[in-house]
Image: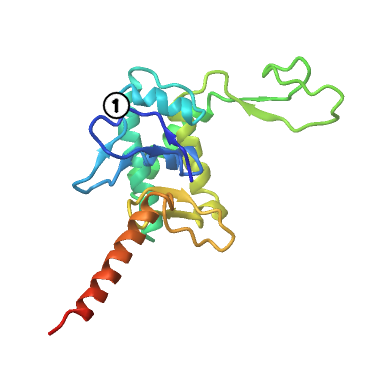
Amino acid sequence: MASSVDLDPRSYPGTYKLIGGTPALDLANLVSFRGTAREHDWLEPSGNACRWASAAGLPPPERTDIRRLRRFREVVARTFLAVVDGESPDPDDLADIGATAAAAFANRQLVYPSSSGSDGQGTPDAGPVAARWYDPSPSLLGVLAIDATDLLTSETAIDRIRACTECRWLFLDTTRNQSRRWCDPGDCGNRVRQRRHYRHRSRGDARQRPT
């Protein structure tokens, strides 16, 4: 069971958890029960954005990024929910993700790690190592966009993206037989099982009533 992230829920009775398995999907999940009467925006209040980024191990957002982050979240959510539903994502949303990722990638530098490398990660006496991309000043939106494009262009990953049958949060299904149905079996899984048990008991009670 995933642990909850310390975000301010205001009056909302639920909790937020990093269950996506990847930053882009966790971004999309910053809305609970999207499009329903129970919908809750976890980027309200705005201070939650910094708490979320810190918990997810991502760069902190700039103060002016919150509105852009909220808008980009919906772009990412629409795109991956369309994938889950077997539909083609909106071309404008794909273009938005691609352009944001391209701008972020343009800031990266190709470096070769060494004991005095520019990334500060030395590998003395370790033999030849692979070069790597290094971003001296990563932005939150850029990191999220690159992660989204990595998912969208990976045949292995795209085939494992699922949406919880209860709340529609997105996640990577890493189970061996790809049978995961819920964001968290202790939350949505319990709700589904409780409803199933209630219906079963109600049918049993109805059969036992005298006519």
Residue 166 % position (x, y): 33, 55
Q: What colouring method underlies this structural image?
A: rainbow
Regarding mark 1 in the picture, which secondary structure is present there? helix
> Could you tell me which residue is drawn at 53 percent across and 61 percent down?
178
Residue 29 % position (x, y): 37, 41
Query: Residue 162 appears in which quarter of the rendering?
Result: bottom left
Residue 173 % position (x, y): 51, 54
Looking at the picture, tell me which residue is in the foreground, 163 or 86. 163
Q: In the picture provided, is 104 more to the left or to the right than 62?
A: right
> Could you tell me which residue is drawn at 26 percent across and 39 percent down?
40
Identify residue type, mark 1: Arg
Q: How many marks?
A: 1
Residue at the far left in the pictured view: 211
The C terminus lies in quadrant? bottom left
Q: In the picture provided, is 73 more to the left or to the right than 109?
A: left
Residue at the far front in the pictured view: 210
Looking at the picture, tell me which residue is in the foreground, 136 or 157. 157
Residue at the far bottom in the pictured view: 211
Q: Label 1, on which residue?
A: 67
Residue 175 % position (x, y): 56, 57
* Image vertical order of residue 8 relative to residue 40, above or below: above
* Image vertical order of residue 123 relative to residue 79, above or below: above
Looking at the picture, tell me which residue is in the foreground, 156 or 207. 207
> Could you tell me which residue is drawn at 30 percent across and 71 percent down?
200
> Could you tell me which residue is drawn at 40 percent across and 56 percent down?
84
Q: Residues within 10 Å of mark 1 (few under 14, many from 20)?
A: few
